[in-house]
Amino acid sequence: MRGLVSSPGQALAAVGLFALMGWPGLAPVSATETTAPVDPMGAGQRMYREGLLPSGEPMSATVQGDVPLIPSQVACIACHRRSGFGATEGQTLVPAVNGAWLFKPLEIGRREFYALRGEGPGARPAYTDETLARAIRDGIGADGQPLDPLMPRYALEDDDLVPLVAYLKSLSSAPSAGVTDDTIHFATVVGAGVAPSRRKALVDVLEAYFRDKNANTRQETRRAVYPAMHKEWKYRAYRKWQLHVWDLSGPSETWRAQLDEYHRNQPVFAVISGVGEGTWGPVHAFCEEAEVPCVLPNTDRPVASETDYYSIYFSKGMALEAEVLAKHLTETVPDGPILQVFRAGAGQIAAETLRAALGAGGDARLEDRLIGPDQALPPAFWSELARARPAALVLWLNCADLQGVGALAATADPTRLYLSGTLCQAPARAIPPTLRPRVLLVYPFALPQAWARNLRRLQPWMRARDIALTDPYLQLNAYYAARLVGEALMHIRSNFSRDYFVERIEHSVDRLAAPSAYDHLSLGPDQRFASKGGYLVRFSDQPEGTLTALAWVVP
């Protein structure tokens, strides 16, 4: 797992600075005066995140005495994470290496006296520029003891150490924007074209959650000022939450400028939830470039990227449905043509993803039928499709488009029909009983039975706050996102680093007991989609029209 060192092999994927805080170290190496690079912070960041020297050449290092690392294994970020706060897995500790930890003494609490000791196991003096350079190059800690053998020893010249040490001093050393001494600011984004009823459903849940959080029922404000000595780490971190609603308008090309203006007027620590009816790309780009975490927005068009960091989604949306279906079609549908019908927008994203996921064989089997934006789909349209005799008919259409699909029931052709659970969330109303035995639904949400239980858990909370249940999917997910943010903030103490917050989000999903519209949510380091699969479901006769899962499919 990236960012963790629990074996020599994982250490080889590791970092520029393994156990600099609190693991035994050695003896100093003198550092000569050098001329700093033109952009020392940028150069230091590249060394830490990418393992590249200011010259652009890869850094070199060894572990376990004489085992050389290859260029892709030397970046510090792999073990100490982007924030520099390190990580743990089981009994393995990867200590923090940011400025707030390196350049102050590490003291260990004496529980019986609520006091601190600065000597003995686990304690160490503060690093200086010289002892930090020695640790990086020679593996000797601030206390003069050897560091762990899995900490790489780097072959770095004095000139190259200057930007790296400067970057470590600045790394997560001050609260990120959007945090004051008593308030932490959040935003939620409402895309252009979102119906007022959906906006209200989202904002009502978030505002109610924020009111609860700020109610001070446990006297957090007083405890933040006068904490008990042994709980100071916890209560000093208390901040009032403030929500800002960022409403977008006009063409999507103008959204980025609107978001920049909102953020200039009031920086926020993170974006919680949100809702969009079309593209989410401009919001994603803003969050990545402004380095603002964007936690679980409601969109069926998320941006999938191997390198982006700050945007975390429930799932890949329509692309996930297409990948689930592609795996199913490959394994179960015999050779023969597959016809997919879709409109521009979310349906087209799914259609294009399905073609790519099926690969070269899909190009030969797959036929596309793009429906015009105002084109009606009368019974004659469906009869024409039936005459094409495809082995499978994939309908990336909403429930309204399926009103005439019953015409297919009059044909003797046993073509299997596949529908989208995202685009048609009430299929029993759209599909007549005579056609249901031939229908499979790609369903990325929790199964209806589990979904109903999740909703029953949320409804008492909503009723107590006079919130009408008008958009269950959206309201469940908004509540879950707010709960997840609260869980993550509980564990960052007073370290209000956006990067560290994202890392805590990654670790909080698996243990969060809160309802959402999805099943099997989990995250790990650098994962950005919490739901990795989807169900294939069919209609059941007991009771009529209900949905029963055939399989959970992970592409």
Image (spheres, rainbow, N blue to C red):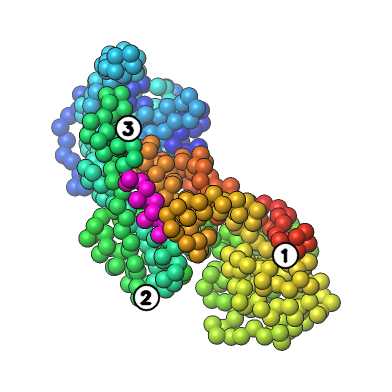
For label 2, the crowd category at 10 Å Cα-Cα, with few meaning under 14, some 14 to 19 and many 20 or more, is few
- Pointer 2 with pointer 1, Cβ within 8 A: no
Report the amino acid beneath label 2: Pro
Q: Quadrant of residue 404?
A: bottom right
Compared with 393, 174 (above or below) is: above
- Helix, strand or loop at mark 1: strand
Query: At 30% from the left edge and 34% from the top edge, which residue is drawn?
Result: 235
What is the total number of numbered labels drawn onto the structure image?
A: 3
Give the residue number, with chain letter if any, for mark 2: 251
Most common SS among magenta residues: helix
The answer to whether any part of residue 531 appears in the image is no
x and y percentages locating residue 28 in the rendered image: 24, 20
Query: At 73% from the left edge and 73% from the top edge, which residue is drawn?
Result: 432
Instruction: Check residue 164 in the rendering and tell me which mark sits there, or answer none.
Output: none
> Separation of disc 3 and disc 2 at Cα?
44 Å
x and y percentages locating residue 450 in the rendered image: 62, 51
Q: Earlier in the sequence, mark 2 or mark 1?
A: 2
Give the residue number, with chain letter if any, for mark 1: 545
For label 3, the crowd category at 10 Å Cα-Cα, with few meaning under 14, some 14 to 19 and many 20 or more, is some
x and y percentages locating residue 279 in the rendered image: 45, 68
Give the residue number, with chain letter if any, for mark 3: 234
Q: Earlier in the sequence, mark 3 or mark 1?
A: 3
Viewer-side label of 3, 2: 3
Report the amino acid beneath label 3: Lys
Viewer-side label of 2, 1: 1
> Magenta residues, as a range?
204-215
Is residue 6 on the magenta stretch? no
Query: At 57% from the left edge and 71% from the top edge, which residue is drawn?
Result: 347
Q: Quadrant of residue 296?
A: bottom left
Compared with 142, 41 (above or below) is: below
